[in-house]
């Protein structure tokens, strides 16, 4: 399993649970956005487009990218900052596009460790 990456979280404004069809619809729209604008991670790989359930059924996330630490604390910190600097702005653009397509859902982007 990877160590960190950039994610987008989605939660309905009324906090209702997501159906399987809604999750599929989010993933389909995200795939179209990524494909149309050729969004890629810092390694040049296309962002992932599969939203997945979390332990909270009203929250779904997509791990746009996955990265690994090398073991050196200083280099790892620099890598995390580099990924955040290069991917987060792209993820915010995607959030804006998703928000326009799904106004009933709140989307947020972040680069985080897991």
Image: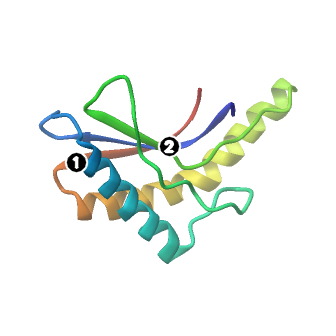
Viewed as shown, does residue 27 lie left or right of 20? right
Q: Residue 105: which disc?
A: 1
| Residue at screen point 24% across, 40% down | 18
Which of the marked residues, 2 or 1, is nearer the chain's N terminus?
2
Viewed as shown, does residue 25 lie left or right of 27? left
The CA span between labels 2 and 1 is 16 Å
Please provide percent x and percent y for residue 69: 78, 32
| Residue at screen point 28% across, 29% down | 57
| Residue at screen point 69% across, 34% down | 2
Please provide percent x and percent y for residue 17: 20, 34
Asked if residue 40 is positioned above or below residue 5 in the image, the reply reads below
Local SS, label 2: strand
Asked if residue 43 is positioned above or below residue 33 in the image, the reply reads above
Residue position marked by numbered label 2 in the rendering: 7
| Residue at screen point 16% across, 40% down | 13
Quadrant where the image shows the N terminus = top right
Please provide percent x and percent y for residue 49: 49, 55
User: For this rendering, which residue is in front, 86 or 13?
Assistant: 13
């Amino acid at each position: 399993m990877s160590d960190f990456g950039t994610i987008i979280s989605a939660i309905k404004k009324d906090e209702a649970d997501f159906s399987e069809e809604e999750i599929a619809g989010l993933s389909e729209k995200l795939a179209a956005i990524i494909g149309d604008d050729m969004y890629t991670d810092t390694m040049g790989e296309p962002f992932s487009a599969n939203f997945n359930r979390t332990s909270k059924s009203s929250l779904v996330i997509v791990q746009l990218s996955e990265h690994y630490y090398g073991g050196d604390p200083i280099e790892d910190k620099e890598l995390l900052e580099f990924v955040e600097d290069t991917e987060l702005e792209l993820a915010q653009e995607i959030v804006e596009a998703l928000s326009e397509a799904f106004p009933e859902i709140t989307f947020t982007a972040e680069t985080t460790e897991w």
